[in-house]
Amino acid sequence: MDARLEPFEIKMQKTLKNLEEEYGAIRAGRANPHVLDKLKVDYYGTPTPIQSVANVSVPEPRMIQIQPWEASMVKVIEKAILTSELGINPSNDGSVIRLVFPELTEERRKELAKEIKKKGENAKVAVRNIRRDANDTFKKLAKEDVSKDEIKDLEDAAQKMTDKYITQVDKAVESKTKEILTV
């Protein structure tokens, strides 16, 4: 692989990785501790991930249990969950917080499938923008005595790379949609 293509490949990889992380946060009717990944709680004035102040486990397929290491964190974690976009009401017994995930309705599954498709489209746009940036960079090489054939080869390689990542995005969209729509 041409070293001039490498920075663009890295950006496309990051785009795909970001999409997969976003998909990890979409819940599919079963408990997935990754839905808490983006939530931060105030720990002595520092925004801290919940996993850093509590033990997060999945004792049942549709329940996440959060056991804070300090009793004072129970209310803080509970508040963070309530103000998040999770849409789940936490229950606590004073020392442990439980999140019970309801079965997804058909309507909610379809909404999530649309959201998945939209995130996939955004990822494809990002990949195409990276290709455009690559092509712009290659066109500037013409001023540096790089042959038109070499520039054309670089552009073709960028297109192949783009096609590869668009295909991977499509596969990710398809598999996540299938996971959501499976009852």
Image: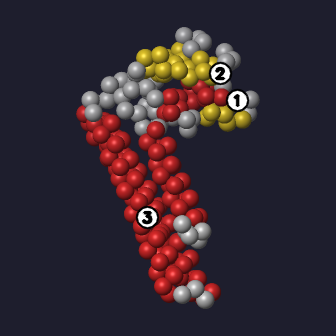
Q: Which residue sits furthest front?
A: 1
Q: Where is residue 97 in the image (x, y as percent from the top left)?
A: 54, 18
Q: Which residue sits furthest top?
A: 93
Q: Residue at x 67, y 36 (%)?
A: 47
Residue 122 location, quadrant: bottom left
Q: Where is residue 91 in the image (x, y as percent from the top left)?
A: 49, 17
Q: Which of marks 1 and 3 is nearer the N terminus?
A: 1
Relative to 82, residue 112 above or below = below
Instruction: Residue type at mark 2: give it.
Output: Met
The quadrant of the image that shows the N terminus is bottom right
Residue 162: give its label. 3
Residue bearing the label numbered 1: 43
Q: Could you tell me which secondary element the residue under label 1 belongs to?
A: strand
Tell which tag, 3 or 2, sits nearer the viewer: 3
Instruction: Residue type at mark 3: give it.
Output: Thr
Residue bearing the label numbered 2: 73
How many other residues sit within 10 Å of disc 3, few (<14), some (14-19) or many (≥20)? many
Residue 61 located left or right of residue 55: left
Disc 3 and disc 2: Cα gap in Å?
46 Å
